[in-house]
Amino acid sequence: MKKKVVVAFSGGLDTSFTVMYLAKEKGYEVYAACANTGGFSEEQLKQNEENAYKLGATKYVTIDVTEEYYEKSLKYMVFGNVLRNGTYPISVSSERIFQALAIARYANEIGADAIAHGSTGAGNDQIRFDMTFMVLAPNVEIITLTRDMALTRDYEINYLKENGFVADFTKLKYSYNVGLWGTSICGGEILDSAQGLPESAYLKQVEKTGSEELRIEFKKGEIHAVNGEVFEDKIAAIQKVEEIGAAYGIGRDMHVGDTIIGIKGRVGFEAAAPMLIIGAHRFLEKYTLSKWQQYWKDQVANWYGMFLHESQYLEPVMRDIEAMLQESQRNVNGTAILELRPLSFSTVGVESKDDLVKTKFGEYGEMQKGWTAEDAKGFIKVTSTPLRVYYNNHKDEEI
C-alpha cells in the first residue's frame, strides 16, 4: 500500500511543488489539506482544490478553523491588548499554530504516515509547524522539501512546468501573507533597514479623506457591535472594522523583532481591524479596570503574546494566562468612540455603565467629595514618611 502524506496546502509555489513531487517522485498518496483561518476567499479555496488535483493529490480538503482561531486565540489577544514589541498584532504568524493544529488532527484522523509543509529553514513557521506536529502527531514523519532540499524558486517553477503544471508563480518584489488579523509584507525595501515601504507596496490603498467617527461596543471584553450594528458572529465584526479602517489606510507599520531562531526579522504590515479593536479595547479598559488589574493583566498579556509568537501555544501556562485574561474582562463593557482619518486614528471617549471616572467621591483636578482637606494632608504626610526618614539620615546626599 502507498504511504499517506498530508500536505499543509496553501496553493503557493512551495506547497504546490511538494504535492507534485511527493506524488510523482516518491509515490505517496497525497492528501492536500488547506487549513483556513480566515485568510482565504471562496474563489481562492476553489482554485486550491482544482490545482491540488492537477498536481496529483488523491484528495483535497478545506478545514475551516476560523472560529476556533477566534475562540482560542484572537479574543485573548484582544483581552490582553497584545502587540509584540508594542507594535505588531502578531498577525498571520498567530494563525500558523491553528493551521498546524488542524493539519495534525486531520493526519491522525486518516492515519497518515507523514505530514509535509512548505517552510524554509530560515523562518519561524518551520518551528510552529514542526513543534505542533511533534506533540500532536508524534508517530508521523515530518517532510519539508523546501528546507531539506534547499530548493530555489526557479527549480520548483521549472519542475512544475516540465511536468505540465503552469501557474502564475511570478517572483514579485514583495511577498504577502493575508489573514483575518492582518497582512504581512516581506521583501523589497524591507530588506534595507534604512528604507520604508512605498504606497504601492500596500494591498489596500487610502480611499477616504476627511474624518469619521467609529464606535466599537464591547461586552465582557469581546467586540459586540460596530457603529450600533450588533454582531453575534465575531468574525464578521472584525471584518466590518477592517472594511471601515482599511479605507483610511489605518494599521500600517513596520515591525522589527527577534525571531525564534535567533536572528532579527523585519516585516511590514497592514492591520486596520486589529489596531482599531485593540486601541478601542485598551481605551475602554482605562475607564473600567482598577490600576492593579491593568498592571498585572499587562504583565501576563506580554508573556501570552511572546509565547504565542514563539510557538509555545501548547505550553500549559497559556491556559492559566487565558483564565486570568478572561476573568479580567467581567467589567469591560461599553462603547469606545474613535475618530478616523487617513493613516491614523485618535480616541475620543467612552460610554459605559462601568465607567470608574464617574464617581461620587470626586472629580480629578476639581473638588474632592470622599475625603476632607485634612484627610488629604494626612495622607500626603504618611506617604512621604519613608523618604523623610531616608533623607534625614543621609543629609549629605545631593539630589
Image (cartoon, rainbow, N blue to C red):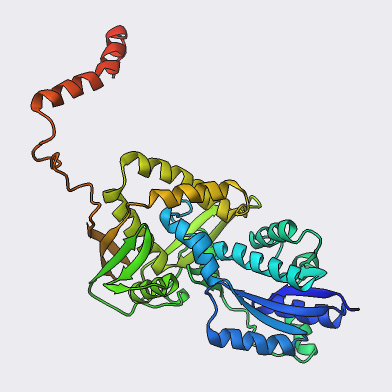
Tally of numbered discs? 0
Q: Quadrant of residue 391?
A: top left
Q: Position of residue 311 (x, y in %)?
A: 62, 55
The single residue placed furthest to the right in the displayed view is 1
* Observer-nearest of 364 and 169: 364
Q: Position of residue 399 (x, y in %)?
A: 28, 19
Q: Position of residue 64 (x, y in %)?
A: 58, 75
Q: Quadrant of residue 210?
A: bottom left
Q: Quadrant of the N terminus?
A: bottom right
The single residue placed furthest to the bottom in the displayed view is 164
Residue 334 visible within the image: yes
Q: Is residue 348 above or below residue 258?
A: below
Residue drawn 19% across the image and 19% down it: 381
Q: Quadrant of residue 21?
A: bottom right
Q: Is residue 256 above or below residue 274?
A: above
Residue 191 visible within the image: no
Residue drawn 36% across the image and 57% down it: 220
Residue drawn 73% across the image and 90% down it: 54
Q: Position of residue 95 (x, y in %)?
A: 56, 65
Residue drawn 42% across the image and 70% down it: 234
Q: Is residue 69 left or right of residue 213?
A: right
* Observer-nearest of 76 and 54: 76
Q: Is residue 244 left or right of residue 364?
A: right
Q: Is residue 223 above or below residue 353?
A: below
